[in-house]
Amino acid sequence: MRNLVGVSDAVRPSGEAPHGTSLLPADLTDDQLDAAPVLDSIDSLLIEELSEDEDDAFAAAFES
């Protein structure tokens, strides 16, 4: 006869999400979305130390 034993708390279902998805991020509530910070401009993400190629790749990622 075998006894199954969980190897960590991570495998134990939390009861708040369907089994198998308890480690995935949950959807934000409307209140959480309202309280989330919002960027005024993509320029807020400017990283001055980037090379021109890195900057182009960074900008391309936002365009896709």
Image (cartoon, rainbow, N blue to C red):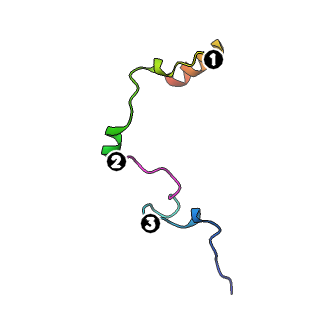
- Left or right of 15, for residue 61: right
Q: Are marks 2 and 3 in contact (CB under 8 Å)?
A: no
For the question of whether residue 64 can be seen, the reply is no
- Looking at marks 1 and 2 on the same chain, the residue that comes earlier in the sequence is marked by 2
* Residue 23 forms part of the magenta stretch: yes
For the question of whether residue 44 can be seen, the reply is yes
* Amino acid type for the residue under numbered disc 3: Gly
- Looking at marks 2 and 3 on the same chain, the residue that comes earlier in the sequence is marked by 3
Q: Residue at x 35, y 40 (%)?
A: 33
**Separation of marks 1 and 2 at Cα, in angstroms:** 36 Å
| Residue tagged 2 | 29
Within 10 angstroms of label 1, few (less than 14), some, or many (20 or more) residues?
few
State how many labels appear: 3
Q: Residue at x 38, y 29 (%)?
A: 38
Region in magenta: 22-29
Q: Secondary structure at mark 1?
A: loop
* Amino acid type for the residue under numbered disc 1: Leu
- Left or right of 51, for residue 42: left
Q: Quadrant of residue 16?
A: bottom left
**Separation of marks 2 and 3 at Cα, in angstroms:** 18 Å
Q: Secondary structure at mark 2?
A: loop
* Amino acid type for the residue under numbered disc 2: Thr
The N terminus is located in which quarter?
Answer: bottom right
- Left or right of 50, for residue 24: left
Residue 35 % position (x, y): 34, 39
| Residue tagged 3 | 15
Within 10 angstroms of label 3, few (less than 14), some, or many (20 or more) residues?
few
**Separation of marks 3 and 1 at Cα, in angstroms:** 45 Å
| Residue tagged 1 | 50
Residue 15 % position (x, y): 44, 66
Q: Are marks 1 and 2 in contact (CB under 8 Å)?
A: no
- Looking at marks 3 and 1 on the same chain, the residue that comes earlier in the sequence is marked by 3
